[in-house]
Amino acid sequence: MIEKSQKFECEKCKKEFLVIEQESALYKKKGIPMPSNCPECRREKRSSLRNEKRLFKRTCDKCSINLTSSYPKDSEFIVYCEKCYFDYVGGN
Ligand SMILES: [Zn+2]
Ligand SMILES: [Zn+2]
């Protein structure tokens, strides 16, 4: 399967990076601006955030319930609330 993707230039290191269609659709759906940094710079930023052990208010990617997560809203990680997570892994 060929994934459609868009090219962006990283604001920080000026390197080109690709955002696949699936990912940009998710940003659009959630009203999040497209990333301005390449995955490496984003990872760097994230690990510096992790050192501060911050928690972010965000919503479940499935049912949109409010929750706190160690990943910010604009991270590329899918975050589920407890219930959706257990549904997902086939709990009950
Ligand atoms: Zn970069
Ligand atoms: Zn949920």
Image (cartoon, helix red, strand yellow):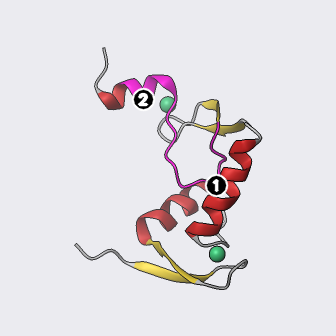
Up-down: is 71 above or below 90?
below
The amino acid beneath tag 2 is: Tyr
Query: Tag 1, which secondary structure?
Result: loop
Query: Would residue 34 be visible to someone looking at this image?
Result: no
Q: Nearer the viewer, residue 36 or 48?
A: 48
* Percent x, y of residue 5: 43, 78
* Percent x, y of residue 44: 66, 60
Figure quadrant of the C terminus:
top left
Query: Would residue 64 be visible to someone looking at this image?
Result: yes
Q: Nearer the viewer, residue 67 or 28?
A: 67
Find the magenta span and give its range: 70-86
Q: Using residue 88 as the reference point, say whether residue 55 is left or right of it.
A: right
Sequence-first tag of 2 and 1: 1
* x 45%, y 22%: residue: 83
Q: Is-magenta flag for residue 81?
A: yes
User: Residue 89: which disc?
Assistant: none
Disc 2 residue: CB within 8 Å of ligand 2? yes
Q: Residues within 10 Å of mark 1 (few under 14, many from 20)?
A: some
| Secondary structure mainly formed by the magenta segment | loop
Q: Is-magenta flag for residue 92?
A: no
* Spatial separation of the CA atoms under disc 2 and disc 1: 19 Å
* x 49%, y 81%: residue: 6
* Residue that label 2 marks: 85
The amino acid beneath tag 1 is: Asp
Up-down: is 29 above or below 73?
below
Write down the quadrant of residue 41 in the picture: bottom right
* Percent x, y of residue 26: 50, 58
Query: Tag 2, which secondary structure?
Result: helix
Q: Quadrant of ligand 1?
A: bottom right
* Percent x, y of residue 74: 64, 55
* Residue that label 1 marks: 74
